[in-house]
Amino acid sequence: MLCTGGTGWLTIDGITRRVSSGEAAVIPAETPHLYRADERDPWTIWWLHADGSDVDPLVGVIVGPDRDPIVPVRDIYTAVGSVEQAVSAFEHDETTASLYVAAGAAWRLLSQLASDRLRGPAATADRIHIVQDFLRSNLAATTSVSELARLAGLSTSHFSALFKASAGIGVVEYVRRLRSARARELLITTDAPIADIALSVGYADAFYFSRQFRLVNGTSPSEYRTRAHRDAI
């Protein structure tokens, strides 16, 4: 279960743990458990069940003996994207081709969580990961590349080069894709007006948001929402 907002609670072996936004709860097969949303701050979650010969080894890395089943997720939007891809594949049809897509998405998600577990808390991450965590937590903020470089303790040019080497894309494109991923989630899961969604992901101008969204997704926000709702029927 991926928590993208609010708070929930997971009980395993008589121990109740808090699950907060930006965390995943990984529950091994055949493990009795209870989970619930917090009454004051109910969570928003994405979830999937995974089965197969490769699942147990990965889950063992994530929640091996005596390991907390709650995993801080460094890139929650990439994780959600994997779940969304798996769900979309099954919604399309149940052909072998779609099953391959869904299996690949589930493998990517579990691999990401295993990596996050091994790398440890975000506080131990390198400077670029600290900046990426900041950007994910402050999508609506207007922040310049020079300000992010100062956060990393690097010159602007050095920071930009290191960021692109680490992420594979520049800072501006990285922020655009982060905001687009969050916008896609809101378009699918809420009925909020597009202008409100634009503002929540850092675009005061809804028309500019639409142009940025189209650059990433090849379609406008309204068209994306219409298509997603139609495919879900």
Image (spheres, rainbow, N blue to C red):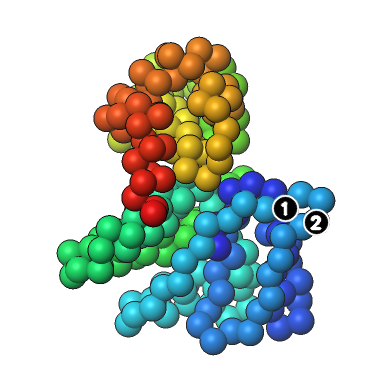
| Mark 1 crowd level (few <14, some 14–19, many ≥20, 10 Å Cα) | some
Q: Is residue 6 left or right of residue 72?
A: right
Q: Is residue 18 left or right of residue 208?
A: right
In the picture, the disc for residue 42 is 1
Q: Are marks 1 and 2 in contact (CB under 8 Å)?
A: yes
Tell me, yes or no, if residue 59 can be seen here.
Answer: yes
| Mark 2 crowd level (few <14, some 14–19, many ≥20, 10 Å Cα) | few
Q: Position of residue 143 (x, y in %)?
A: 55, 18
Amino acid identity at mark 1: Pro
The structure residue drawn at horizontal position 58% and vertical position 56%, both measured from the top left corner, is 45
- The residue closer to the viewer here, 100 or 87, is 87
Q: What whole-number distance in Å separates the C-alpha atoms at marks 1 and 2? A: 6 Å
Q: Position of residue 183 (x, y in %)?
A: 48, 34
In the picture, the disc for residue 69 is none
The structure residue drawn at horizontal position 55% and vertical position 37%, both measured from the top left corner, is 191
- The residue closer to the viewer here, 7 or 187, is 187
In the picture, which quadrant includes the C terminus? Answer: bottom left
- Of all residues, the one furthest to the right in this rendering is 40
Amino acid identity at mark 2: Glu
Tell me, yes or no, if residue 133 can be seen here.
Answer: no
- Give the secondary structure at mark 1: loop
- The residue closer to the viewer here, 92 or 154, is 92
Q: Position of residue 60 (x, y in %)?
A: 47, 77
In the figure, 50 relative to 197: above or below?
below
- Give the secondary structure at mark 2: loop
Q: Which residue is mark 2?
A: 39
In the figure, 213 relative to 107: above or below?
above
The structure residue drawn at horizontal position 36% and vertical position 18%, both measured from the top left corner, is 211
Residue 175 lies in what quarter of the image? top left
